[in-house]
Amino acid sequence: MKAGWQRVAPGGWGSHRTIGAAVRAASDGAVVSVQPGVYQESVVLDRDVMVVAAKGAGTVRVVSPRGPALTVHGCAATVRDLAVEAPGEVAVLLHGGSPVLEGCEVSGGRVEISADADCTLRRCDVHDSTRAGVYLTGTSRGLIEDCTVRSVDGDGIRLDDAARAECARTTVERVLGSGLHLSGDAGGVFADCEIGRCGDAAVLVAAPAHPLLRGCRLHDTGSQGVRIEGATGSQPAGAPEGREDGTAAGQDERRVRLEGCEIFRTATEGVLAGGDSGIRLKDCQVRETRATGILAAESCRMDLDGVRVADVAGTALVVMGTADVRAHRATLTRSEANGLHCSGESAVELNDSEVSRTAFTAVHLGGGARATLRDCHVHDTPEHGIRAHERADLLAERVRVEQAGMAGVCVEDADATLRDCRVSDVMTGALITTRHRPLLDGCEFSAVTRTGIEIGPDTGVFIRGGSVQRTGSAGIFVDERSEAWIEDVEITDAEGSALVIWTGARPRVRSVTIARSGKNGIYAGEGAAGLLEDCDVSATGFPALYVGAKATPVLRRCVVHDTKEDLTLADGAEPVFEACRTRDVADSTMPHTDAEEVSALPVPAGKRGSAGGTPETAEDGRKEDLSDLLDELDRLVGLDRVKQEVS
């Protein structure tokens, strides 16, 4: 026998019959070579020796009659290519020291790493264990590489207390609990691991544990892909990251982090974060979940960067409670409910993101939720592109909304600010009904099946700049009692009337350009009022202006040109014109005044009539001889200068 070697064999000259006897006879640094066979014993290692299967893996089996089959106490022993089996909960107990297990098979009980052990498991197969496959507790450290943990009646890998693990290229499968379970202040880095076919979540984190997962695949679970519970002492969403140097990053960064991971085929949510937890997902994919893709609940904080959620049976991203979610370069697509759903007092921010191909409204905001969308693309939904209702607050900047079966943007009772947004190929461009005063600043609406912007009753929206083009009916519709402010807007190519002011509405309209409307340029319904200043109306299919019965709009410095007819009035209409002008109008009856003068409109008999009861029609009236009109004008009392200009 070589010096420093101890030989173990079931029988034979010059050999120990048990591994324990050989270890007791060995000095530090010795090699214990074990010949093929089954050894019924409990091996205890308390010195720095190497125990190896002489003929390689699968030839030596250590079976404990009771208790752990292998115990390592406070030493740097190495065990290679042994199969270890125990009938109890613990098959291998690593208590302190820095032991190494390589190429070993452990069954019947778990591998438990406790106290301050700093151990290594490499190319090991742990299976048919109870409660856990590999369990780290205390202040222990574990390096787990190229291992398999399977068929466990409990969790695959579990960390408690202040334990840390660095786990790479390891597979966890067919476990009744969670594949990876962390609690207490545990943490670590898990890279390129495969965790699947779990009865519970693939990864379960109980606060304030904080693992980092890189390049992992989490799939085929009985519940979530990742579930985070409790309080982690997280940083606020959007806070600077910690270091990126392996385990140190997992220790210093107090959030749960996933980078480059795939989560798919989960029985419930792909990711569920609750409590006061913090989580960051970067360049991850969540797909084929049977419920919500990602759910942020309670007061958790979540950052999403380059995350794609697709093909989920519920909503792609749900934010509720007081959760705060920041998303950059996110893709939420092919969901069987909403793309994004926010409720409670939650807050969400989406930047440079896409929400598309949803079965319900793409972006839905309710409760007191606050949402900010910047440089996003929302498209392909049978319902609304973006809907804010109840007490929700929406800020959308440079957002494109396309191919919505209902409204591109719908604001009901909520508040909203839209800047430089583009809405096209939708049923209604914007539908706004609220007692707040939403702002539409520089927004463009085009290729709209019905109304470009529909302002509901009692709504005081402020529309500044932008355009409304190619609408199937009205360009902008101002419903009863509304007091909208509309400035510097272009309304072109409406198949109906360009601007409709309905019963009792009192908008303030300034510097609006209207061209090529299929019906009236401006339609003021019965009892409508308001102020229209510096507007330009041209190329209308019906008379440029229609004023309904008892309507009293004031038109100041408006110009009507290049159209067949400028004005039709209903009986009892009382509009006021100040310094208005016409040019290139074939049939003109609109009065012209100096800027200093105000005129109640003279109403030629042939110009009074009905608009047919809808804002999309106007009556042509009978033609009058020009001399008859001039005679009737001359019989009116006063306003000589006005008479001269009209003549």
Image (cartoon, grey):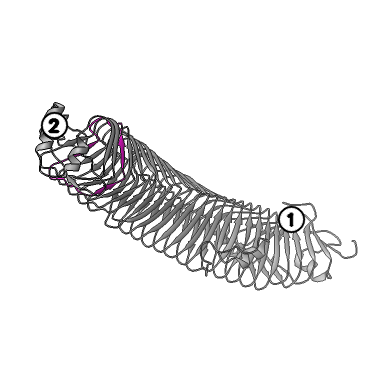
Identify the secondary structure beneath mark 1. Answer: loop
Residue visible at 70% across and 65% down in the picture = 119
Q: Where is residue 445 in the image (x, y as percent from the top left)?
A: 37, 41
Identify the disc placed on residue 629: 2
Residue visible at 20% across and 44% down in the picture = 502
Q: In this view, does 560 lie to the left or right of 504?
A: right
**Image depth: mark 2 or mark 1 in front:** 2
Which of these two is toward me, 632 or 282?
632
Q: Position of residue 8 (x, y in %)?
A: 80, 61
Quadrant of the image for the C terminus?
top left
Which of these two is toward me, 516 or 94?
516
Q: In this view, does 635 lie to the left or right of 583?
A: left
Q: What residue type is labelled 1?
A: Asp
- Mark found first going from the N terminus, 2 or 1: 1
Above/below status of 472 relative to 232: above
Q: Is residue 419 magenta?
A: no
Q: Where is residue 269 in the image (x, y as percent from the top left)?
A: 45, 52
Q: Is residue 40 left or right of residue 562?
A: right
Identify the secondary structure beneath mark 2. Answer: helix
Q: What residue type is labelled 2?
A: Leu
Identify the disc placed on residue 546: none
Q: Is residue 550 magenta?
A: yes
Which of these two is toward me, 101 or 498?
498
Q: In this view, does 385 lie to the left or right of 326?
A: left
| Disc 2 to disc 1, C-alpha distance | 112 Å
User: Which residue is identified by label 1?
Assistant: 81
Magenta residues, as a range?
529-552
Residue visible at 65% across and 70% down in the picture = 140
Q: Can residue 281 be seen in this view?
A: yes
Q: Main SS type for the magenta part?
A: loop
Crowd class of label 1 (few under 14; some 14 to 19; many from 20; radius 10 Å): many
